[in-house]
Amino acid sequence: MSDQPPPDSTPRQRWMAALARAPRRRLAEAVAALDPLPEHTVLRPPEVGLGLVRGRMGGDGRPFNLGEMTLTRCTVRTSAGHLGHATIAGRDRAKAELAALLDALLQEPARQPALLSGLIAPLIAEQAAARTACQADTATTRVDFFTMVRGDE
């Protein structure tokens, strides 16, 4: 299973994925840097629940239920009327609210370019670099199995 959005995903899906994987500290710094701090209303306070995680046999075969994981979701509305949603892995309520607020702010045409270039693009690059490093570390443990052919066929 890949932890990156599919190539045909929308820009909003890509920024929501980046926000969901970002550390809370980065989201808090981005919101604190906004001037003026945007007013918003929490429509759905951060709630912790469970989500079913599905896997696939061999990575691309038949789906099966792998288990459940803890998720936190939140919905906010900015004073401009934009709705922001966030669903993150884990129990970090503050991170869920920050991600939802940033999702709403990214929908505002006046704020979008600065947030995309100043926050989302660096997050996506950092997450891709971390994924590549993890794959490189994992590749060193790879074992290639082969079958030896016996003399009698």
Image (cartoon, rainbow, N blue to C red):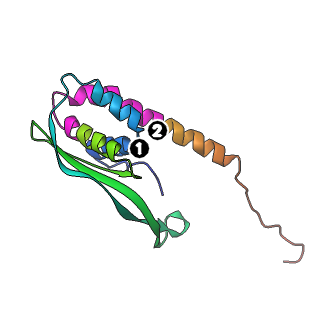
Residue 116, compared with residue 74, is above or below; it is above
Residue under the point 66% across and 47% down: 139
Q: Which class describes the residues within 10 Å of circle 2: few (<14), some (14-19), or many (20+)?
A: some
Residue 65, compared with residue 31, is above or below; it is below
Foreground: 30 or 15? 30
Residue 16 in picture, x, y percent from top left? 31, 44
Q: Which comes before the other along the chain, label 2 or label 1?
A: 1
Which amino acid type corresponds to the residue marked 1 in the rendered image?
Arg
| Residue 104 sits in quarter | top left
Which residue was labeled with disc 2?
Answer: 127
Which residue was labeled with disc 1?
Answer: 21
Residue 50, compared with residue 15, is above or below; it is below
Give the residues in magenta.
Answer: 104-127
Asked whether residue 55 is in view, the answer is yes
Whether 119 is among the magenta residues is yes
Give me the disc on residue 53.
none
> Tag 1's secondary structure?
helix
